[in-house]
Amino acid sequence: MHIVTLGNGTGQATLLRGLRAYACDVTAIVGVTDNGGHSGQLRRLLHLPQMGGTRQCLSAILDAQSVWGQLLRHRFRDGELGGVSVGNLILAALAQQYGSLHAAVEAVRQAAGLRQWVLPVSEGDTHIGAELQNGQCIVGEWEIMQRQPRTPIVRLFLQPPVAAHAAVIEAIAYADLVVVCPGSLLTGTIALLLHP
């Protein structure tokens, strides 16, 4: 059975940890529009897709005691590096070296000997945008979540529009089961599904 999971990080990673116990093929398709935290900082500096959710999914399917598992999960605790994710840095470095986040993830997957697949939904440096009931548009996941006042959202869009990676389309086409993982509906799940 080929299971495809759609998500954005924590909820998806939890499901993937559970699926490790079963003999099935798993492909995790991960959103790339989150702009907060350390991975958001890397996005701004390096103009890469968001990689924090992808890192969480990779680390969820790795043995926690393996070197790769420890590296992808490690965050510095103190000083100027406090909160910095080693896994995000590894993926960013490999993305620069290989030319894409997809190639970086595949390099880690092969080096770690994983049979499961993790696919960022796209290669684009895109953001989720929201048109509000009052006509105002806000771009950025955290900007949408923290908007004040909480004016209702009438439309969501990607800014700029970015298509899904061909491998993502292929994985969904051959899936026996597609699971939408728990997470933020508007800025997470719908953002992922907006990639044509």
Image: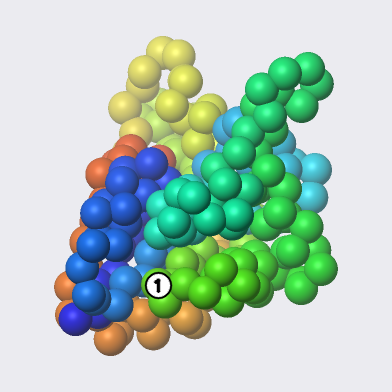
For residue 58, above or below residue 88: below
Q: Residue at x 80, y 21 (%)?
A: 80
Badge 1 amino acid: Gln
Residue 124 image point, x, y percent:
62, 62
**Which residue shows up at 23% across the image and 62% down it?**
21
The secondary structure type at the circle numbered 1 is loop
Outermost residue, front direction? 65
Vertical order, 44 against 91 (above or below): above
Above/below status of 98 relative to 142: below
Q: How is the image coloured?
A: rainbow
Residue 106 is at least partly visible in this image? no
Residue nearer the viewer, 56 or 132: 56
Pointer 1 local density, CA inside 10 Å: few below 14, some 14–19, many at least 20: some
Give the residue at x 61% y 39%.
74
- Can see residue 36? yes
Residue that numbered label 1 is attached to: 116
Q: Residue at x 43, y 27 (%)?
A: 145
Looking at the image, the residue that sits furthest to the top is 149
Figure check: 159 above or below 196: above
Residue 143 in the image: x percent, y percent?
53, 28
Q: Nearer the viewer, residue 75 or 173?
A: 75
Q: Position of residue 76 (x, y in %)?
A: 68, 29
Quadrant of the frame with the C terminus: bottom left
Seen from the viewer's position, the closer of residues 194 and 96 is 96
